[in-house]
Amino acid sequence: MRIEVICTGDEVLGGKIVNTNFSYISQKLEDVGLSVQWETTVGDHREDLLQAFLMAGQRADAVIVNGGLGPTIDDLSQEIAAKAAGVGLELNEPWVARMEEMFRRRNRVMTPNNRKQAMLPIGSEMIDNSVGTACGFAIDIGKARFFFTPGVPRELHRMLEEQIIPRLLARSGEQTAIYLKRFHTYGLGESHVDVMLKGVENLVPDGSVKLGFRAHYPQLETKLTVRGTDKNDVHAKVEPVTREVRKRLGNFILGEDDETLEGVIMSEMGRCQGTLAVVETFTSGQIAGRLGHLPGAEIVFRRGTVARQLAEIYTAIGLAEVPTGGELTPRTAEVVATAARQQSGATHALAVLVALDEGPDRIDLAGTICLAIATGHEVASRRSRIVGGRDWVRLGAIEMGLDCLRRFLQGLPVQERIDFEKTENKT
Amino acid sequence: MRIEVICTGDEVLGGKIVNTNFSYISQKLEDVGLSVQWETTVGDHREDLLQAFLMAGQRADAVIVNGGLGPTIDDLSQEIAAKAAGVGLELNEPWVARMEEMFRRRNRVMTPNNRKQAMLPIGSEMIDNSVGTACGFAIDIGKARFFFTPGVPRELHRMLEEQIIPRLLARSGEQTAIYLKRFHTYGLGESHVDVMLKGVENLVPDGSVKLGFRAHYPQLETKLTVRGTDKNDVHAKVEPVTREVRKRLGNFILGEDDETLEGVIMSEMGRCQGTLAVVETFTSGQIAGRLGHLPGAEIVFRRGTVARQLAEIYTAIGLAEVPTGGELTPRTAEVVATAARQQSGATHALAVLVALDEGPDRIDLAGTICLAIATGHEVASRRSRIVGGRDWVRLGAIEMGLDCLRRFLQGLPVQERIDFEKTENKT
């Protein structure tokens, strides 16, 4: 089945908005084993929209159009869809009623131009939007089925997942049960994981499990897409592969599916009724900033201390003896974490200290990271070197600090070699 | 002049990469008064690439193609460009020599497949890439001039600005002197600024000044694009408009052109040889995180303190009397900022305290922000309510804290009504 996507709108075409709707649509389709072959972006311009619709209608079996369903004069999708399909527009009374109800619930009055959003091409299938006033619809243009979706991301996401993808799967004639299993890791590069997982797809010999990756430094997402006849079938198929992936990636898996590193840390802290103190230097509050604003953090997150100078850190956490010169060591981080925990009364403290190399920013600028995690009866630490410029070092140090805390809370070794660090083990 | 853009590559089409190259190209063209009419994304697939090139060659006057110039087997741009233009490929010896020189400088050996990057369609114009091994080129296909650019953002940016845009301007027959003036503001919405600046373009009666906006909450960028015969002409034209914009937007302008809010704060702090302490609650280190990692912050940024509980803040900054219950007031922020400054010995302290409303996250969840800035002889404060959910309140509080610090350092009023806050003035 050939699928195309048409994105509309002057703001997307003019680059005022980065087109994340398209990458979202494309990824969601890949996750269920479908793929986009062609994408077109046009502005809010009648001639271009018509041409784009007609051309896609000649080439594709299914087309997803995004945007242009709003109430204003430059929202043209319904009008041009009707023209391309050779039909008129008619008011969809059920949708008018739905909109009036939505406005009533929000204590607002519906303006006359909102009625425009309920004008659909004659003969089209209405597609429900449970979170907004833009009504989706489907209609045939040329040899393709067109699905019209709203530009507001939240509305697009719901409509795509709940309404459009099931229709596409039904049309594709594929086995409709699809399952996506995701693993999130920190510290392993895509090509390394590719080698580590060599052959796992073959545990299911019929080729119904497909392996894929999505890298967003410093994390990597590993995806298994599984097809089958029904829910039981896909679960039975993915189970041995999931087990094997867990075995091979082991401690590097920081979460699965919708889990996040921050979320896992928060729930581990909740489980042990722990509280946390964080001390940072070059990461400058960005480790605290990943945790401290989350729901539940008002209990878990006790205190964060930030300074660029180690002497200032020592003063802030009540350590009398200020270190003089010398190299940053894991022992320094241990002393800092221990003192920060005692000072704040938290059950756990994380200290991430970074010594950035001298000189201007450059691609081979490196930083030394010494971090430690302390509790009342235990302290763990590690040293690492990351090369790649100021931003790269900073982002790596944030993630390493959080991931080591996750490992500590899960009883895993804090020290395990990662792909992003230089081979140096001075500890 | 009709301009189209063709983006190529399975990773962009499959949504693994969000297509920021396209929005970059489109914005850069708008900045010089050109605009993109049509965009197409296709994968690394011979038939689709050929079809996309031929169709754009029929419709457009100029086409920018992005990606597919790499050394690997799935990089097809040169091959398909040659096919679409009806010519063969030939090795560009000067580019081979350039690549060999690049590899030598990096102490690496050039692999044979890099030679593929120097295979250009016969009759094409080589376009220099000063920062990478992908050679750009231009060739006619159909009635359009095609410009082929690398997918690596850094390489694209240089090539677009230094090589492609001048060629496009020359082809467009427009006056080639273009100047872009930018103003960055916090606290004013796009439609409000649009009204405030009504008519400024008409200060230059020949229509050569164009006003535009780019909103990225919480900041807004206001752009003036000026055309003229030469550099002196554009500067003479933009000067009265710039003066008028500065007058009308006044204190809300946090920076111009490449200036950032953080950069302005750092340079104001540097100017007064100041040092800074920051205290945060719900923003959880994200205010410190905007400043503390910057070059120069090792001197300016003294200390950051983060806690979700006000009592914990009081303990951390050495205030004996812990506040009991009661509403958060600007006075609280003043006490905290004053104590934090004294404790750290910094010349300035910024305290941003947020009381988030109760209940689950929702679109009308609000937060009360009380912030203060203290020096040894002065303290300024303000109170504000922001509505729009947890993330909206958090982002607003970060920006308001930083912008009030900027205002304070520049001797401007800290308290000035902004568009994002509810009308409440309980202070």
Image: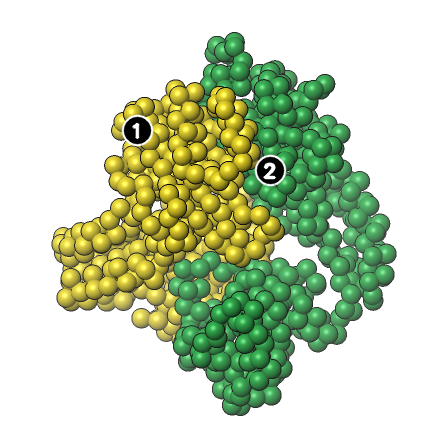
Chain colours: A green, B yellow
Along the viewing direction, whichever of B157 and A239 lies nearer the viewer: A239
Q: On the picture, is B28 further left or further right than A162?
A: left
Q: Which residue is mark 1?
A: B378
Q: Measured from the top left, where is residue A3 in percent x and y?
A: 61, 71
Q: Residue A190's image quarter?
A: top right
Q: On the picture, is B261 further left or further right than B11?
A: left
Q: Say which residue appears at 57% left-offset and 84% top-offset.
A: A92
Mark 1 touches mark 2? (CB < 8 Å): no
Q: Residue A276's image quarter?
A: top right
Q: Say which residue appears at 78% left-offset and 65% top-offset.
A: A177
Along the viewing direction, whichever of A402 and A23 lies nearer the viewer: A402
Label 2 CA crowd tier, 10 Å (few <14, some 14–19, many 20+): some
The chain under label 1 reads: B
Name which residue type carries label 1. Glu
Q: Which mark is residue A154?
A: none
Q: Measured from the top left, where is residue A180 in percent x and y?
A: 73, 56
Q: On the picture, is A348 further left or further right than B124?
A: right
For the question of whether residue B152 can be seen, the reply is no
Separation of disc 1 and disc 2 at Cα? 31 Å
Label 1 CA crowd tier, 10 Å (few <14, some 14–19, many 20+): few
Name which residue type carries label 2. Glu
